[in-house]
Image: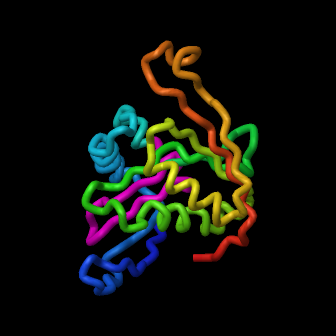
Amino acid sequence: MDISTPSVVTSETGEDQIQKWTFSKPMAHDGDDVFTLIANCPPLDTNSSYCNFLQTTHFSNTCVIAKYDGEIAGFISGYQKPDRPNTLFIWQVAVAPQFRGKGLAFTMLDNLLSRDSLNNINAIETTITEENNASWALFNKLDARNGHNGEVSTFLDKNIHFKGKHETELLYRIPLTQIKQKG
């Protein structure tokens, strides 16, 4: 089921744009657009397009796609950890260049967390490289909203795990303490 939520996002001119924005569970037909979006969002790692099709089908309940006038503007992929189903692992957050700096990533994250099907989620985890300032800002904002109880630790080390081919991925775990709003 594709659930779209009309939203109000303030444009640069100050005018409210109503019903031009939709936030929904992705579907199979979104897979190629998600692949293209992620490819246009360095430093995100591109995966195979097949992976993006799996995200938009098998994991659609834990992903969100944002569209502006039908055009993909952003995407968050995530999944419930098999060994900790109350933890939502956020894999990637992608925002098209023309939509950056307007709070879209946080709006998508809020939309995702407000889903009834994710009521059991009591923590968010994600991995971030040290230099990914946009991701740090997004998840620091979520952490602040939830009482600054987040913890950062090394998840995959540059030298031990990646053999020098990729920067260290730091695990950011944020307990969710704020009562979720229903959207």
Q: Farthest bottom residue?
A: 15
Residue 148 coordinates in the image, percent (x, y) = 70, 58
Residue 182 as seen in the image, left or right of residue 34: right
Q: What stretch is highlighted in magenta?
A: 54-76
Residue 15 coordinates in the image, percent (x, y) = 29, 86
Res 51 → quadrant: top left
Residue 9 as seen in the image, left or right of residue 148: left
Residue placed at 45% from the left, 23% from the top?
166
Asked whether residue 56 appears in the rendered view, the answer is no
Magenta stretch encompasses residue 149:
no
Res 182 → quadrant: bottom right
Residue placed at 51% from the left, 56% from the top?
138
Residue 85 coordinates in the image, percent (x, y) = 73, 47
Count of residue discs? 0
The quadrant the C terminus occupies is bottom right
Residue placed at 52% from the left, 40% from the top?
128
Residue 149 as seen in the image, left or right of residue 7: right
Res 121 → quadrant: bottom right
Residue placed at 39% from the left, 63% from the top?
66
Asked whether residue 75 appears in the rendered view, the answer is yes
Residue 131 coordinates in the image, percent (x, y) = 45, 38
Residue 153 as seen in the image, left or right of residue 127: right
Magenta stretch encompasses residue 56:
yes
Check the image and tell me how it is coloured. rainbow
104 to 163, vertically: above or below: below
64 to 85, vertically: above or below: below
